[in-house]
Amino acid sequence: MAYIDWKISGPKIGVCSCDYGCPCEFNGKPSRGVCEGGEAHLIEEGFFGDVRLDGLVIGASYRWPGPVHEGGGWAQGIIDKRATDEQVDALFKILGGEEQEPTTVFNIYGSTMDGEDDPLFADLEFEADIEARTGKLVVDGKTMLNITPIKNPVTGKPHRARIVLPEGFEFREAEMGSGDITITEGLKMQYEKVYGVLWHASYGPYGVIETAA
C-alpha cells in the first residue's frame, strides 16, 4: 500500500513508573503494577507530505492498569502551541496512526488504548543531551519530565547503561537515565528516580527509519 510520505526525527525522552531498565522492554510486568508515564519528542526534521514540521515539540502522558499488551490504556497528547492548523492536522494524522503500517509505534500503542483526553496545546520547552543522559520537558512553565544520569550507589559517579532491541518498534538502542515525572492535571502522577530513557527517534510510514535509529 502506498502512503503519503512523512518523517519525524530528533531526540526523544521518556519517563515511566517502572524501575530502571523497565521490565516491559523484556516482556515482563510493570514494576508497580500500573504502567504510567510521559514522553516528549523534538522534531528536528519533519514533514507530512508538503507540510514541514521542523522545530516542533510533541509529547504525551499515558496510563495502563497493567501490562501494556493487556490494553485498557488512556492517554493525553501534548502539542506545541506554535503549530499552525495545517501542522496540527498533519501531527494528528501521524500520531493517530494514519498513512502508516499497522506495525508502527503509533498503531501498536494505539491498539492498546481505550480512550484519550482532549490534547493539550501548550508552551513547551525541551532539552535533551543523549550522550550525557540528561533531558527535560517543561509544559507551560512547569517541569513535567526530568532525566539525569543514574548514579553508582557506592562511588556516586554517573552509571551508564543502554538497552539494545534489534527488532524494537519504538527504538533499536537507547540510553538509560534516572527519571522524575510530575503531572498535576489530567492523568495525575508523581515519581522520582524511576525509568528514564533517551534516544534519537526517527519514524516514517513503515516504522523506525534504520539509518537514523
Image (cartoon, rainbow, N blue to C red):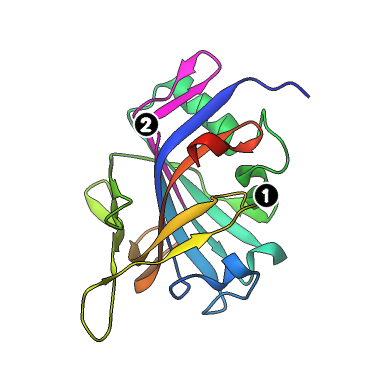
**Is residue 203 found inside the magenta-colored segment of the image?**
no
Q: Which residue is mark 2?
A: 44
Residue 210 versus residue 65 in the image, above or below:
above
For the residues marked 2 and 1, what is the alpha-carbon distance in whole angstroms?
Answer: 24 Å
Residue 178: numbered disc: none
Residue 114 appears left or right of 153 = right
Magenta residues (range): 41-60
Q: Quadrant of residue 46?
A: top left
Query: What residue is pinned by disc 1?
Result: 108
Residue 139 can be seen, yes or no? yes
Quadrant that contains the N terminus: top right
Q: Position of residue 139 (x, y in %)?
A: 29, 48
Residue lying furthest bottom in this view? 154
* Label whose residue precedes the other's in the sequence (2 or 1): 2
Relative horizontal placement of residue 116, taking residue 153 as reference (left or right): right
Give the residue displayed 42% in from the left and 25% down from the top. Answer: 53
Camera-nearest residue between 149 and 95? 149
Q: Amino acid at mark 1?
A: Ile
On the image, the x and y values in percent for residue 80 come to 36, 35
Dot 1: element: helix
**Magenta segment, prevailing SS (helix, strand or loop):** strand
Q: Residue at x 62, y 76 (%)?
A: 29
Q: Residue at x 21, y 79 (%)?
A: 156
What residue sits 54% from the left and 69% below the top? 35
